[in-house]
Amino acid sequence: MTHKLFIITSLAALLFSGCAQNAPDLNGKNNVSGTDAINGDTVSINENNYGNNESGIDANGNYNSSSDGFKSIYFAFDNYSVSSKMEANMQTNIQVATAAGAKIKLEGNCDEFGTDEYNYALGLKRAKAVKDSLVAQGVASSKMIMVSFGESSPVCQTPSDSCYDSNRRVDLRLVR
């Protein structure tokens, strides 16, 4: 009888525990829980009010979905470091941000890979990396707010590497 009770209890525990799915891990840390430090700089917005901005392709072959003279900043897969390839775009953004009288919204975006929670956190980390770069060049932190769209605001939906690349970005816009 004890043996049967043990088997039934074990099967019930397996049934109710399910299979947990862990978010991808960046740099040895689970980033979903690491967003508390930047949540105070974020805003909530209605995502349905924002469409794709048809700004076109820039000189580097990147789609620019930023507006107001800003240039989108693109990221490698599963990464939130601003690469040296984005230096020209960052210089443009520093100039525009310095001249801007309004607040600047940094919109973090991701491709479709990863859980919703993970992509939301990654979008915030990408926005924070761009904010930190702008602050390091003298742009006032108080002039910037961050939001993450995660994977919900793609500029491309074709299943290809170049399309996925164009969705891993931070867009910059003036807050009106």
Image (tube, rainbow, N blue to C red):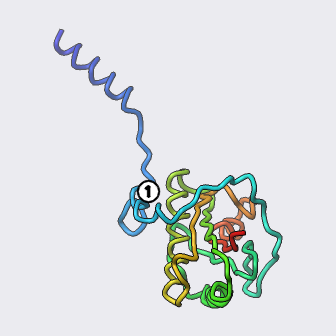
In the visual, does 52 lie left or right of 175?
right
Image-quadrant location for residue 16: top left
Which one is in front, 127 or 97? 97
Check the image and name the residue furthest to the left. 2
Image-quadrant location for residue 83: bottom right
What residue appears at the point 39 percent right and 56 percent down from the top-left corner? 33
In the visual, does 50 lie left or right of 20?
right
Image location (x, y in percent) of residue 170: 62, 71
What residue appears at the point 60 percent right and 89 percent down from the top-left corner? 87
What residue appears at the point 66 percent right and 74 percent down from the top-left corner? 172
User: Residue under circle 1?
Assistant: 32
Image quadrant where one finds the C terminus: bottom right
In the visual, does 82 lie left or right of 104?
left
Number of callouts: 1
Image location (x, y in percent) of residue 108: 60, 66
Q: Which type of secondary structure does the marked residue at label 1 adopt?
A: loop
Give the amino acid type for the residue marked by disc 1 in the picture.
Val
